[in-house]
Amino acid sequence: MREINVRNYIPNLITLTGLCFGLSSIRFAFFEEYKAGLICILIAGVCDALDGLFSRILKTQSELGAELDSLADFLSFGVAPGILLYLGVLSGLEIWGYVAVTAYIVFACIRLAVFNLSQSSGNQAAYGGYFMGVPTPAGAGLVMLPLIHSFLGFDWGINNPHAVAIYTGVVGILLVSKIPTFSLKQLNLSIERRFYLRFFFLFVLIVLMLINFLWQFISIVGVLYFLSLPISAISYKKK
């Protein structure tokens, strides 16, 4: 009987954990617990980063893992944010809110399908430190900004649902666009000794910000990412 190596299943277990948090986010959305739903999506994002990291460290990449990762991403960063946004902001628009959210989810599905095709054909999804288009986890963060801002007392999204519907469609288009965006997947995991202290300080600072100023921190990061899109395009052209 072949011995089962638990190490080979660690990345897939992390992926499935993220999928469970994505499903929990949808459940919280129907109970109008939008903050809890958003936190579940954030944890799913952490799981999405960790499964890829562990698969590279443990050298356990597999076709099954790639397919599970895409399916989990579609639910956690496509369907779940769409449902949260619709129930939290766009439900008053009825059909137009539904159309905007459906468009975003469809574009997220297309994005992941193209990503899978690029991997199976041998073409990497990241080109020298860049993605083509906005990745689905980043797209989920962008599309949730109107709801996050409402937690901070800025109700521009709730007061202007038509603008949010247009914004949601724009984010969906960015997912399938050819705009180069910065990718962190090409960063070298080995950190030189002299940078250990800086890396540790930055990590602790981010954790403290997430604990004490969760929605403010996420809002600022989302806005900065949106503003970085033209910068990444210019940088890509120069290279």
Image: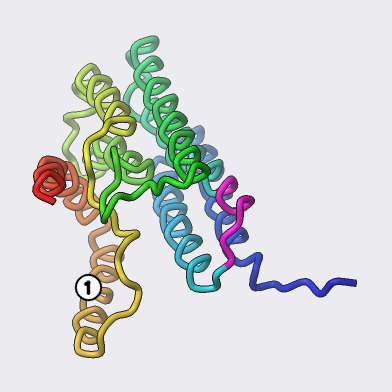
Residues in magenta?
60-68
Q: Position of residue 221 (x, y in %)?
A: 20, 52
The residue positioned 29% from the left and 23% from the top of the image is 169
Residue in the image at 34% along x and 43% along y: 135
Residue toward you, 108 or 191: 191
Colour treatment of the image:
rainbow
Image quadrant containing the N terminus: bottom right
Q: Main secondary structure of the magenta part?
A: helix
State the residue lying farthest toward the front.
122
Q: Against 158, is 144 above or below?
A: below
Residue at figure coordinates x 27%, y 57% from the top left: 214
In the shown orientation, is residue 206 left or right of residue 42?
left
Dividing the picture into quarters, in which one does residue 110 lie?
A: top left
Question: Which residue is at a point 33% across and 13% down the rendered structure image?
Answer: 93
Left or right? Give the position of 120 relative to 89: right
Please tell me whether residue 228 is drawn above or below residue 7 in the rendered image.
Answer: above
Q: Quadrant of residue 71?
A: top right
Q: Amino acid at mark 1?
A: Leu
Question: Going by the picture, which residue comes out furthest to the bottom?
Answer: 193
Residue 16 among those drawn in magenta: no
Q: Position of residue 151 (x, y in %)?
A: 26, 43
Where's residue 26, x and y in %?
Answer: 51, 37
Vertical position of residue 209 compared to residue 138: above or below: below
Q: Secondary structure at mark 1?
A: helix
Side of 2 where 111 appears, left or right: left
Q: Which residue is mark 1?
A: 205
Q: What residue occupies the far right of the structure in this picture?
A: 1
